[in-house]
Image (cartoon, rainbow, N blue to C red):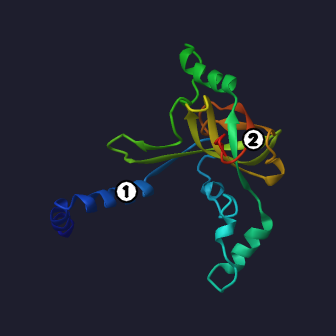
Amino acid sequence: MLIQIIGQSFSRFKPWKRIMEIDVYNIKRYLLGSVGDDLESRFMTPFDVGWDFLVKFNHDFTGKDALLKLAEEKRRTAVTLEWNGEDVGKIFTTKLIPGEEPCEDISVQSDVFWNEQPEEPGFTYRADKVFAGENQIGISSGRIISYNYNSMISLGFINPKYAKEGTKLEILWGTPGTRQMKVRATVKKFPYNSEF
């Protein structure tokens, strides 16, 4: 009864309704990509994304020791990954061959999108494993089709040892339980914009 009253009293305040919906969507998230349900590997530190200059250690604060340890480890660094167009095309083609198990749709414009199913609202987040040979060295996230550069690119959060521009890597496309295929990728400068 109380929920009905609260719901009715807030129903005329559309901004509050929207805020409540957004909160629910973050709780109702869907994790796609070869990283699977492993949330831990999806989380980034300020040092993984190149924001270490924002962390100031000249004062005491909760978590300072943990951040100092992370700053020393430098386990990942941000790069741009340029996906091989031929490999992307092969994945897309699996949807057009009768009798063949299709891969997940690689033509979707972005890796973060709204799930439009009304019974299951929420946001979908994709992260795929990045490999150097047989060794997983990080993840790829934020994949987009760049019409300005006529390519598919993504953010890569990888072991700094492999972050040199021009390094050849592979991305494993496909959520566990679906067909998976590897895509060749090349490390490019971060940010990708050619005007910088």
Mark 1: which secondary structure? Answer: helix
- Residue at image coords 18%, 60%: 11
- 10 Å crowding of disc 2: few (<14), some (14-19), many (20+): many
* Label 2 close to label 1 by CB (< 8 Å): no
Numbered mark located on residue 22 in the image: 1
Residue 15: x and y in percent read 26, 60
Q: Which mark is residue 187?
A: 2
> Looking at the rendering, which quadrant does residue 69 occupy?
bottom right
Secondary element under disc 2, as helix, strand or loop, is: strand
| Mark nearer the N terminus (2 vs 1) | 1
Location of residue 62 by image quarter: bottom right
115 relative position to 11: left or right: right
Q: x and y percent of residue 39 in the render?
A: 60, 56
Location of residue 141 in the rendering, given as x and y in whole percent from the top left corner: 61, 46
State whether residue 101 appears in this view: no
Q: CA distance from mark 2 to mark 1?
A: 34 Å
Task: Assess disc 1: are there few (<14), some (14-19) or many (≥20) residues with their C-alpha within 10 Å of its C-alpha.
Answer: some
**Disc 1 marks which amino acid?**
Ile
Give 159 or 6, whichever is nearer the viewer: 159
Asked if 85 appears above or below 18 in the picture, the reply is above
Mark nearer the viewer, 2 or 1: 2
